[in-house]
Amino acid sequence: MEKPDDIDADFHRMVITPFDMVLWSRERMLQHVDVAVRLMGHLHDCEPELAERWRSQLNRERVETGRPGLVVYLRGEFLEELRQHPRYGYLAEWMAEWTDEADRYRVAALEDLGGDQAALAKLDEEVRCRH
């Protein structure tokens, strides 16, 4: 029995590339940021003290990293605090999972690129421009 002519084309479409991994990483982080922005707005309205603690953490990180345009995200000490919250803990878990998944995709892409940080940065830019 002969194989169909398109079997090789199908196989090559199934190969996951570093570009795919960077794209998936970016999608997870955009998902995280989208929920974080909505959560910050909700907390601002409904739990102002909690929102202020989060804003304080983000502001400290902006100063420490020197990146004034740092986006709203959930990591570090505030993530751990929110995980314990009876109303918002499940969101913190989801966001932590998305971040971990995004990080795993980036590590896998970097490994496939032989550890070349410049190539990863170039792929980041390519993904940003296309999507």
Image (cartoon, rainbow, N blue to C red):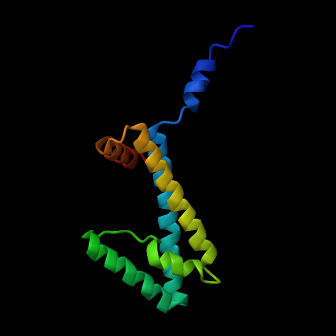
For image coordinates 49% across by 55% down, the residue present is: 102
Depth check: give the residue in front, 78 or 33: 78
Q: Is residue 68 visible?
A: no
Whole-percent x and y of residue 24? 50, 49
Q: Is residue 87 visible?
A: yes
Q: Is residue 93 above or below residue 52?
A: above
Whole-percent x and y of residue 62? 30, 74
Tell me where residue 126 sits by quadrant.
top left
Whole-percent x and y of residue 72? 42, 71
Depth check: give the residue in front, 37 or 77: 77
Residue that lies at the very extreme toward the bottom in this rendered image:
49
Residue that lies at the very extreme toward the left in this rendered image:
66
Q: Is residue 110 above or below residue 96?
A: above
Q: In this view, does 8 lie to the left or right of 26?
A: right
Q: Is residue 6 above or below residue 96?
A: above
Tell me where residue 2 sits by quadrant.
top right
For image coordinates 54% across by 32% down, the residue present is: 15
Total label count? Answer: 0
For image coordinates 39% across by 80% down, the residue present is: 57
For image coordinates 45% across by 53% down, the residue present is: 26
Depth check: give the residue in front, 56 or 37: 56
Q: Quadrant of the N terminus?
A: top right
Q: In this view, does 95 lie to the left or right of 73?
A: right
Residue that lies at the very extreme toward the top in this rendered image:
1
Whole-percent x and y of residue 99? 50, 61
